[in-house]
Protein backbone atom coordinates (compact mmCIF):
# COMPACT_ATOMS: atom_id res chain seq x y z
CA UNK A 1 0.00 0.00 0.00
CA UNK A 2 1.02 3.60 -0.49
CA UNK A 3 0.95 5.81 2.59
CA UNK A 4 -2.21 7.47 1.29
CA UNK A 5 -3.96 4.15 0.75
CA UNK A 6 -2.89 3.02 4.20
CA UNK A 7 -4.27 6.13 5.90
CA UNK A 8 -7.56 6.17 4.00
CA UNK A 9 -8.08 2.47 4.74
CA UNK A 10 -7.61 3.14 8.45
CA UNK A 11 -9.99 6.12 8.20
CA UNK A 12 -12.56 3.74 6.68
CA UNK A 13 -12.23 1.58 9.83
CA UNK A 14 -10.64 -1.26 7.93
CA UNK A 15 -7.27 -2.91 8.50
CA UNK A 16 -4.52 -1.78 6.10
CA UNK A 17 -1.18 -3.55 5.66
CA UNK A 18 0.08 -1.86 8.83
CA UNK A 19 -0.97 0.84 11.25
CA UNK A 20 -0.35 4.28 9.71
CA UNK A 21 2.27 6.41 11.47
CA UNK A 22 2.14 10.13 12.15
CA UNK A 23 4.95 12.47 13.17
CA UNK A 24 4.24 16.02 14.28
CA UNK A 25 7.44 17.67 15.49
CA UNK A 26 8.87 21.10 16.16
CA UNK A 27 11.52 22.43 13.77
CA UNK A 28 14.02 22.23 16.64
CA UNK A 29 13.33 18.54 17.21
CA UNK A 30 13.48 17.78 13.50
CA UNK A 31 16.88 19.46 13.29
CA UNK A 32 18.16 17.40 16.24
CA UNK A 33 16.84 14.19 14.67
CA UNK A 34 18.36 14.97 11.27
CA UNK A 35 21.72 15.68 12.87
CA UNK A 36 21.53 12.49 14.95
CA UNK A 37 20.78 10.39 11.85
CA UNK A 38 22.97 12.30 9.41
CA UNK A 39 20.04 13.09 7.13
CA UNK A 40 20.03 16.06 4.75
CA UNK A 41 16.45 17.33 4.93
CA UNK A 42 12.97 16.99 6.41
CA UNK A 43 11.70 14.70 3.68
CA UNK A 44 14.47 12.16 4.32
CA UNK A 45 13.66 12.29 8.04
CA UNK A 46 9.95 11.70 7.40
CA UNK A 47 10.77 8.75 5.17
CA UNK A 48 13.15 7.32 7.78
CA UNK A 49 10.47 7.50 10.48
CA UNK A 50 7.77 6.07 8.22
CA UNK A 51 5.49 9.12 8.47
CA UNK A 52 2.46 8.51 6.23
CA UNK A 53 1.29 12.16 6.23
CA UNK A 54 2.40 15.38 4.57
CA UNK A 55 1.04 18.89 5.06
CA UNK A 56 0.61 22.01 2.93
CA UNK A 57 0.20 25.58 4.16
CA UNK A 58 -1.03 28.90 2.84
CA UNK A 59 1.48 31.79 3.03
CA UNK A 60 0.87 35.11 4.69
CA UNK A 61 1.19 38.02 2.24
CA UNK A 62 -0.73 40.72 4.09
CA UNK A 63 0.45 43.97 5.67
CA UNK A 64 3.73 43.96 7.61
CA UNK A 65 2.00 45.11 10.79
CA UNK A 66 0.08 41.82 10.99
CA UNK A 67 2.85 39.44 9.88
CA UNK A 68 3.15 36.23 11.97
CA UNK A 69 6.80 36.66 13.04
CA UNK A 70 8.12 39.95 11.69
CA UNK A 71 7.79 43.65 12.49
CA UNK A 72 6.87 42.83 16.09
CA UNK A 73 6.43 45.88 18.30
CA UNK A 74 6.92 44.43 21.80
CA UNK A 75 10.55 43.73 22.77
CA UNK A 76 9.63 40.34 24.27
CA UNK A 77 7.36 39.20 21.45
CA UNK A 78 8.25 36.15 19.38
CA UNK A 79 5.11 35.76 17.24
CA UNK A 80 1.80 37.35 16.27
CA UNK A 81 -1.61 35.74 15.77
CA UNK A 82 -3.82 36.49 12.75
CA UNK A 83 -5.74 38.82 15.05
CA UNK A 84 -2.73 41.02 15.73
CA UNK A 85 -1.93 39.75 19.22
CA UNK A 86 1.77 39.50 19.95
CA UNK A 87 2.92 36.56 22.05
CA UNK A 88 6.07 35.69 23.97
CA UNK A 89 7.62 32.62 25.56
CA UNK A 90 8.52 29.07 24.72
CA UNK A 91 7.09 27.79 21.45
CA UNK A 92 3.81 29.48 20.62
CA UNK A 93 4.04 31.43 23.89
CA UNK A 94 1.46 33.47 25.76
CA UNK A 95 -0.38 36.68 24.78
CA UNK A 96 1.10 40.02 25.76
CA UNK A 97 -2.27 41.78 25.64
CA UNK A 98 -6.02 41.15 25.52
CA UNK A 99 -7.36 43.91 23.27
CA UNK A 100 -11.04 43.10 23.78
CA UNK A 101 -10.84 42.60 27.55
CA UNK A 102 -12.66 45.88 28.11
CA UNK A 103 -15.42 45.32 25.53
CA UNK A 104 -18.90 45.73 26.97
CA UNK A 105 -21.13 45.55 23.89
CA UNK A 106 -21.25 43.51 20.66
CA UNK A 107 -20.69 46.77 18.79
CA UNK A 108 -17.20 47.00 20.29
CA UNK A 109 -16.52 43.48 19.07
CA UNK A 110 -17.70 44.46 15.60
CA UNK A 111 -15.37 47.48 15.52
CA UNK A 112 -12.24 45.40 16.16
CA UNK A 113 -9.83 45.33 13.14
CA UNK A 114 -10.51 41.75 12.09
CA UNK A 115 -8.05 40.17 9.62
CA UNK A 116 -8.73 39.78 5.92
CA UNK A 117 -8.70 36.16 4.66
CA UNK A 118 -7.23 37.52 1.44
CA UNK A 119 -3.96 38.11 3.29
CA UNK A 120 -3.31 34.37 3.03
CA UNK A 121 -1.82 33.38 -0.33
CA UNK A 122 -3.16 30.02 -1.54
CA UNK A 123 -1.71 30.17 -5.07
CA UNK A 124 1.12 27.67 -4.49
CA UNK A 125 -0.88 25.08 -2.57
CA UNK A 126 -2.05 22.99 -5.47
CA UNK A 127 1.46 22.46 -6.86
CA UNK A 128 2.74 21.49 -3.41
CA UNK A 129 -0.16 19.13 -2.72
CA UNK A 130 0.18 17.48 -6.13
CA UNK A 131 3.79 16.67 -5.26
CA UNK A 132 2.54 14.48 -2.37
CA UNK A 133 -0.81 13.44 -3.79
CA UNK A 134 -1.13 9.75 -4.45
CA UNK A 135 1.83 8.82 -2.23
CA UNK A 136 1.00 10.36 1.15
CA UNK A 137 -2.13 11.49 2.96
CA UNK A 138 -2.14 15.27 2.54
CA UNK A 139 -3.26 17.53 5.37
CA UNK A 140 -4.50 21.04 4.63
CA UNK A 141 -6.69 23.89 5.83
CA UNK A 142 -6.11 26.46 8.52
CA UNK A 143 -5.36 25.24 12.04
CA UNK A 144 -8.33 27.36 13.22
CA UNK A 145 -7.69 27.56 17.01
CA UNK A 146 -10.75 29.74 17.58
CA UNK A 147 -11.13 28.92 21.27
CA UNK A 148 -7.55 29.99 21.99
CA UNK A 149 -7.94 33.15 19.92
CA UNK A 150 -11.04 34.12 21.88
CA UNK A 151 -9.05 33.75 25.10
CA UNK A 152 -6.24 35.87 23.65
CA UNK A 153 -8.68 38.61 22.70
CA UNK A 154 -10.78 38.67 25.86
CA UNK A 155 -8.48 37.21 28.53
CA UNK A 156 -8.96 33.75 30.05
CA UNK A 157 -10.70 34.81 33.29
CA UNK A 158 -13.02 37.27 31.60
CA UNK A 159 -13.82 34.89 28.77
CA UNK A 160 -14.99 32.23 31.22
CA UNK A 161 -17.16 34.73 33.10
CA UNK A 162 -18.66 36.04 29.87
CA UNK A 163 -19.93 32.55 29.04
CA UNK A 164 -22.43 33.19 31.85
CA UNK A 165 -22.63 36.98 32.13
CA UNK A 166 -22.60 38.16 28.51
CA UNK A 167 -22.95 35.29 26.05
CA UNK A 168 -23.72 37.75 23.25
CA UNK A 169 -20.16 39.08 23.48
CA UNK A 170 -18.72 35.57 23.28
CA UNK A 171 -20.95 34.75 20.33
CA UNK A 172 -19.88 37.89 18.49
CA UNK A 173 -16.16 37.24 19.05
CA UNK A 174 -16.33 33.56 18.11
CA UNK A 175 -18.33 34.30 14.96
CA UNK A 176 -15.75 36.78 13.68
CA UNK A 177 -12.87 34.44 14.51
CA UNK A 178 -14.47 31.43 12.83
CA UNK A 179 -15.63 33.51 9.86
CA UNK A 180 -11.97 34.27 9.20
CA UNK A 181 -10.76 30.69 9.53
CA UNK A 182 -13.68 29.27 7.54
CA UNK A 183 -12.97 31.58 4.62
CA UNK A 184 -9.20 30.95 4.64
CA UNK A 185 -9.79 27.20 4.58
CA UNK A 186 -12.45 27.51 1.88
CA UNK A 187 -9.93 29.32 -0.31
CA UNK A 188 -7.31 26.67 0.42
CA UNK A 189 -9.65 23.82 -0.52
CA UNK A 190 -10.86 25.61 -3.63
CA UNK A 191 -7.31 26.31 -4.81
CA UNK A 192 -6.12 22.76 -4.14
CA UNK A 193 -9.36 20.95 -4.93
CA UNK A 194 -8.89 17.20 -5.27
CA UNK A 195 -5.35 17.11 -3.85
CA UNK A 196 -5.92 17.41 -0.07
CA UNK A 197 -7.24 14.44 1.91
CA UNK A 198 -7.69 15.69 5.48
CA UNK A 199 -8.76 19.02 7.00
CA UNK A 200 -6.69 19.26 10.20
CA UNK A 201 -7.81 21.72 12.91
CA UNK A 202 -6.80 22.25 16.52
CA UNK A 203 -8.44 23.44 19.73
CA UNK A 204 -7.52 22.21 23.22
CA UNK A 205 -10.75 21.70 25.14
CA UNK A 206 -9.27 19.44 27.83
CA UNK A 207 -7.28 19.78 31.02
CA UNK A 208 -5.43 16.97 32.74
CA UNK A 209 -8.54 16.25 34.82
CA UNK A 210 -11.36 16.79 32.36
CA UNK A 211 -12.89 19.27 29.90
CA UNK A 212 -12.23 23.00 30.30
CA UNK A 213 -15.99 23.67 30.37
CA UNK A 214 -19.05 21.55 31.00
CA UNK A 215 -20.62 19.58 28.17
CA UNK A 216 -23.56 22.01 28.22
CA UNK A 217 -21.34 25.06 27.71
CA UNK A 218 -19.30 23.20 25.12
CA UNK A 219 -22.41 22.40 23.11
CA UNK A 220 -23.74 25.94 23.46
CA UNK A 221 -20.62 27.91 22.50
CA UNK A 222 -18.07 25.73 20.71
CA UNK A 223 -19.71 22.74 19.06
CA UNK A 224 -21.63 24.78 16.44
CA UNK A 225 -18.38 26.35 15.25
CA UNK A 226 -16.66 22.99 15.08
CA UNK A 227 -19.60 21.67 13.08
CA UNK A 228 -19.35 24.60 10.68
CA UNK A 229 -15.69 23.80 10.03
CA UNK A 230 -16.35 20.06 9.77
CA UNK A 231 -19.16 20.68 7.29
CA UNK A 232 -16.81 22.81 5.19
CA UNK A 233 -14.28 19.99 4.99
CA UNK A 234 -16.94 17.44 4.15
CA UNK A 235 -18.37 19.70 1.43
CA UNK A 236 -14.99 19.37 -0.30
CA UNK A 237 -14.91 15.61 0.19
CA UNK A 238 -12.28 15.70 2.95
CA UNK A 239 -11.91 13.83 6.19
CA UNK A 240 -11.82 16.17 9.19
CA UNK A 241 -9.45 15.60 12.12
CA UNK A 242 -9.38 17.59 15.36
CA UNK A 243 -6.29 17.98 17.53
CA UNK A 244 -7.37 18.25 21.17
CA UNK A 245 -5.21 17.84 24.26
CA UNK A 246 -6.21 16.75 27.76
CA UNK A 247 -9.04 14.76 29.26
CA UNK A 248 -11.86 15.61 26.87
CA UNK A 249 -13.48 12.15 26.78
CA UNK A 250 -16.89 13.46 27.97
CA UNK A 251 -17.03 15.64 24.85
CA UNK A 252 -16.25 12.89 22.33
CA UNK A 253 -19.91 11.83 21.81
CA UNK A 254 -20.74 15.41 20.80
CA UNK A 255 -17.76 15.48 18.42
CA UNK A 256 -18.98 12.25 16.83
CA UNK A 257 -22.47 13.75 16.48
CA UNK A 258 -21.20 16.59 14.27
CA UNK A 259 -19.39 14.16 11.99
CA UNK A 260 -15.76 14.57 12.94
CA UNK A 261 -13.77 11.75 11.38
CA UNK A 262 -10.72 11.63 13.65
CA UNK A 263 -9.23 12.83 16.94
CA UNK A 264 -5.53 13.48 17.33
CA UNK A 265 -3.15 13.49 20.32
CA UNK A 266 -5.03 11.39 22.96
CA UNK A 267 -3.04 11.80 26.19
CA UNK A 268 -3.21 8.41 27.93
CA UNK A 269 -2.41 9.87 31.37
CA UNK A 270 -5.29 12.39 31.30
CA UNK A 271 -8.56 11.47 32.98
CA UNK A 272 -10.61 8.86 31.08
CA UNK A 273 -8.23 8.89 28.10
CA UNK A 274 -6.73 5.42 28.50
CA UNK A 275 -6.26 3.81 25.07
CA UNK A 276 -8.31 0.73 25.91
CA UNK A 277 -11.23 2.82 27.13
CA UNK A 278 -11.17 5.06 24.03
CA UNK A 279 -10.98 2.07 21.68
CA UNK A 280 -13.84 0.30 23.45
CA UNK A 281 -16.14 3.30 23.71
CA UNK A 282 -15.45 5.16 20.46
CA UNK A 283 -13.10 3.18 18.21
CA UNK A 284 -15.80 2.00 15.81
CA UNK A 285 -17.17 5.53 15.28
CA UNK A 286 -14.15 7.83 15.06
CA UNK A 287 -10.50 7.39 14.10
CA UNK A 288 -8.09 7.58 17.03
CA UNK A 289 -4.67 9.10 16.36
CA UNK A 290 -2.08 9.13 19.13
CA UNK A 291 -2.01 7.61 22.60
CA UNK A 292 1.75 6.94 22.93
CA UNK A 293 2.68 8.91 26.03
CA UNK A 294 4.70 12.05 25.31
CA UNK A 295 4.15 13.49 28.77
CA UNK A 296 6.20 10.91 30.66
CA UNK A 297 7.37 7.93 28.60
CA UNK A 298 8.94 9.64 25.58
CA UNK A 299 10.40 12.47 27.66
CA UNK A 300 11.69 10.58 30.71
CA UNK A 301 11.76 6.92 29.69
CA UNK A 302 14.37 4.69 28.11
CA UNK A 303 14.20 3.23 24.60
CA UNK A 304 13.25 -0.14 26.13
CA UNK A 305 10.36 1.42 28.05
CA UNK A 306 9.23 3.27 24.92
CA UNK A 307 9.25 0.05 22.91
CA UNK A 308 7.20 -1.75 25.58
CA UNK A 309 4.59 1.00 25.94
CA UNK A 310 4.33 1.47 22.18
CA UNK A 311 3.74 -2.24 21.67
CA UNK A 312 1.11 -2.26 24.44
CA UNK A 313 -0.70 0.65 22.80
CA UNK A 314 -0.62 -1.01 19.39
CA UNK A 315 -2.04 -4.25 20.76
CA UNK A 316 -5.03 -2.38 22.18
CA UNK A 317 -5.66 0.12 19.41
CA UNK A 318 -4.90 -1.52 16.06
CA UNK A 319 -7.60 -4.28 15.79
CA UNK A 320 -10.21 -3.41 13.18
CA UNK A 321 -8.38 -0.36 11.80
CA UNK A 322 -9.41 3.15 12.75
CA UNK A 323 -6.07 3.87 14.44
CA UNK A 324 -3.03 5.99 13.61
CA UNK A 325 0.06 5.48 15.76
CA UNK A 326 1.71 8.63 17.04
CA UNK A 327 2.88 10.49 20.13
CA UNK A 328 0.23 11.95 22.42
CA UNK A 329 1.00 15.46 21.22
CA UNK A 330 1.15 17.02 17.78
CA UNK A 331 4.49 18.70 18.36
CA UNK A 332 7.52 16.75 19.57
CA UNK A 333 9.70 19.22 21.47
CA UNK A 334 13.51 19.37 21.45
CA UNK A 335 13.79 18.06 25.02
CA UNK A 336 12.40 14.72 23.79
CA UNK A 337 15.31 12.25 23.44
CA UNK A 338 15.78 11.38 19.78
CA UNK A 339 16.65 7.78 20.74
CA UNK A 340 13.23 7.37 22.35
CA UNK A 341 11.40 8.70 19.31
CA UNK A 342 13.35 6.40 17.00
CA UNK A 343 12.50 3.46 19.27
CA UNK A 344 8.81 4.34 19.02
CA UNK A 345 8.74 4.45 15.22
CA UNK A 346 10.84 1.29 14.93
CA UNK A 347 8.29 -0.48 17.14
CA UNK A 348 5.40 0.84 15.07
CA UNK A 349 6.99 -0.60 11.96
CA UNK A 350 7.73 -3.95 13.60
CA UNK A 351 4.54 -4.55 15.57
CA UNK A 352 2.03 -2.44 13.65
CA UNK A 353 1.56 -4.95 10.85
CA UNK A 354 -1.77 -6.72 10.46
Image (cartoon, rainbow, N blue to C red):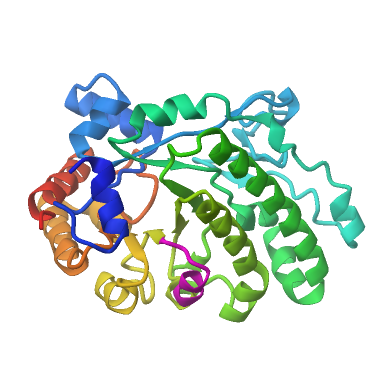
Whether residue 167 is visible here, answered yes or no, is yes
* Camera-side residue of 12 and 72: 12
Magenta stretch: includes residue 288 = no
Question: Is residue 154 in sight in this rendering?
Answer: no
Q: Position of residue 221 (x, y in %)?
A: 67, 69
Q: Position of residue 115 (x, y in %)?
A: 75, 39
Give the percent coordinates (x, y) of residue 298. Answer: 25, 51
Q: Is residue 9 above or below residue 165?
A: above
Quarter occupied by the N terminus:
top left
Q: Nearer the viewer, residue 1 or 154?
A: 1
- Prevailing secondary structure class for the magenta stretch in the rendered image: helix
Residue range of the region highlighted in magenta in the rendering? 252-261
Look at the picture and state if 47 lies above or below 228. Answer: above
Residue drawn at x 61%, y 43% as measured from the top left: 186
If the image is split into quadrants, where does the C terminus sit? bottom left
| Left or right for 133, reference 298 | right
Which residue occupies 30% across, 36% down? 134
Amino acid sequence: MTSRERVLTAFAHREPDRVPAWCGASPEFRELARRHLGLPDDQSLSLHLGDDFRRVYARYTGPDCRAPAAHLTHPEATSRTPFGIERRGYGYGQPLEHPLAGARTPAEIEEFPWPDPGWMNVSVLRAEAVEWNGRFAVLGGDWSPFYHDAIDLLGMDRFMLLLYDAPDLVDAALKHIVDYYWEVSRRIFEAARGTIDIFFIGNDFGTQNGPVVSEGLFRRFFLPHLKRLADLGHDFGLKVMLHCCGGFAPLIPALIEIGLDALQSLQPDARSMEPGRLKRDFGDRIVLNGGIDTHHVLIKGTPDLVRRRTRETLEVMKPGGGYVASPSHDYLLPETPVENVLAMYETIREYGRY
